[in-house]
Image (cartoon, rainbow, N blue to C red):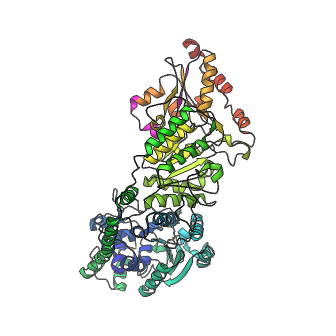
Amino acid sequence: MATALRFLAADAVERAGTGHPGMPLGMADLATSLFARHLKFDASAPKWPDRDRFVLSNGHGSMLLYGLLHLTGYADVPLEEVRNFRKAGAAAAGHPEYGHLAGIETTTGPLGQGVATAVGMALAERMLSAEFGEDLVDHRTWVFCGDGCLMEGVSQEAISLAGHLRLHKLTLIFDDNSTTIDGATAVSTSDDQRRRFEASGWATIAVDGHDPEAIDLALTYARASDRPTLIAARTKIGFGAPSKQGLSAAHGSPLGGGEIEAMRKSLGWSHAPFEIPEPIATAWREAGRRGSARRGAWLKRLAAVEPARRAAFERRISGRLDAAVEPAVRDAIAERVAKPTAMPVRQGSQIATGVLASVMPELVGGSADLTSSVLSRPDNMPLLTRDDFGGRHISFGVREHGMAAALNGIALHGGFVPYAGTYLTFSDYARPAIRLAALMGIRTIFLMSHDSIGVGEDGPTHQPIEHLASLRAIPGLKVYRPADAVEALECWYDAVAGQCPSVMVVARQKVPQVRLAASEVMLSRRGAYLLAGGTRRDLTLLASGSEVGLALETRELLAKRGVEAAVVSMPCWEVFARQDEAYRTSVLGEAPRFAIEAASPFGWERYTGRSDHIFGVETFGFSGPGPVVYAHFGLTPAAISERILRLTGVALKAAV
Ligand SMILES: Cc1ncc(C[n+]2csc(CCOP(=O)(O)OP(=O)(O)O)c2C)c(N)n1
């Protein structure tokens, strides 16, 4: 069976003329033992909620996964799919992409990311099990990874967190082949991987990765472990390719026709490319059906669950929001509008998560050791600990990257809507996972506070400048920057009601409430809206977040000089871009536009049309009281209105 898998991978890479044969050849024995004997899955029901999760963190070995899915009988992976490997538009893409094939649990390719995402999946299993019981939720998470994944820093954050939480149903199978692209790993690392994992509280075992019986024992050992387990499997990259095995030459290019023929001889495989002899094909399909009886029993148990509880479980798995969520948010908005209060936007965000948590048991929060700064935890969200997975706020520790990847894993697992926070400036530490969330189109919410030079005394290390622009540049990511508690409620609702990832950017400092009137629609859900303006519009001020209040004050000063300025609040560019043209035009207006945002001006030209119409911050900030830093950069109503009057003097005089 393993040899069939090897040839499927090697021949597909050969046919594509591109790809990575070394890892599939090296890990075929491990994959075969796992899929044929240990992994709980049913190929006919790839989304069965209680299946084991399998993550191929060393995603360059994608052909191994496609081969496994094909051989075990996943309906969406016929042989044709394998033959199309790496062709334009093929589901069997260069690296495994979530959403392409039902058996791909997460997108992998950026090394280390799969390991950290899997920690989130294993954690989600524990949380969902704590809530609904082992009868419904009792599965494992298995990860394949290579030297590359373990060299990446994010793996350390993930390993450390998993060890701390004692995620005992998590098993990492390490392709210990001492080879990367540059050659032997000895050129760049001397780590003792087992001792490294043991230091973080993992169980470890070493095994010959080409000995099926030994592998079987190791997998059995992992299943009985009371801690997460590392299986360090000694393998040869490119196993079976006579002149390339054990060498980095096998890593990332087709073996070549001659080498594959020699491999056919050395492994005793006489079949043509893509031809799987019947007994072996049958054995693989049987492996794919192995879990069907367990799934049947699970379905029976589910059917026996009391109806309300069953409906709750099914809703959670479906990802639908309960009907009570929207009214709860609307009530909270009405309450804020009735009692306008100046407060930090982060506090408005905390109000929003509290309201959501009261009607969304699926909402899980967390922070990277900044709970009381980011205000990530509302009162009604109990802490999760390794002794109580019923908690709903996760202490991720100072591990932003691991946290962001784990959030993705929680979202991918299903049953939860996860968010967690840090400072916006440290979104850089989480960026690779944010990008993957966007690529996958999953509902992960990254909460980022301390969102500008308004941070003040902590200085330029903590004052984000380019972050908003760079996050807005990520396709498929909604970047919200609410101006007050009302907008925070609307933006949070939009984030949980959507199906794509979001970054919720909130100011640390106190701001006035800008939304004082009740409104039928949640205005922030249109991305931008006219907040203030009369029938005459000499110019339009566009602003987001804490600068919306600044824009309103500027409007007043301009009015004293006879200039009528409209103020448009723009909490989310991405949402605004999706509105119909008539709406967008009506909001933006025909008058000259000016943008105010305490951040890099990069990108605002698309709305202002001119770079000198943007009031932003072009350099790093500096340490000092927030208002002083704002004033230094000309971000005061007086400075802004004066500059606007100077810039538009002629045109405005004519208008006046
Ligand atoms: C974050 C990241 N950096 C670099 C790469 C490029 N890359 C792909 S595979 C690889 C070497 C990985 O070595 P290993 O995990 O040992 O894989 P093996 O050679 O054993 O298949 C590198 C550097 C990547 N995919 N992701």
**Residue 462 on the magenta span:** no
Query: Residue 64, relative to residue 280: is it above or below?
Result: above
Residue 66 placement: quadrant: bottom left
Residue name at image x 28 percent, y 82 percent:
270
Which residue is situated farthest in the front direction here?
A: 306
Residue name at image x 51 percent, y 58 percent:
407
Q: Please say whether residue 604 is visible from this viewpoint.
A: no
Q: Residue 498 placed where, x, y %?
A: 43, 47
Dividing the image into 4 quarters, which one contains the C terminus? top right
Dividing the image into 4 quarters, which one contains the N terminus? bottom left
Which residue is situated farthest in the right direction here?
A: 624
Q: Please say whether residue 305 is visible from this viewpoint.
A: yes
Residue 307 or residue 49, whichever sits in front: 307
Residue name at image x 67 percent, y 29 percent:
636
Residue extent of the magenta highlight: 562-582
Number of marks? 0
Q: Residue 508 placed where, x, y %?
A: 65, 43
**Residue 565 on the magenta span:** yes
Q: Residue 528 placed where, x, y %?
A: 49, 34
Residue 514 or residue 398, whichever sits in front: 514
Residue name at image x 68 percent, y 25 percent:
638
Q: Residue 20 placed where, x, y %?
A: 43, 69
Query: Residue 439, relative to residue 27: is it above or below?
Result: above
Which residue is situated farthest in the left direction here?
A: 278
Residue 247 or residue 346, whichever sits in front: 346
Q: Is residue 154 left or right of residue 247?
A: right
Residue 17 placement: quadrant: bottom left
Query: Residue 457, relative to residue 240: is it above or below?
Result: above
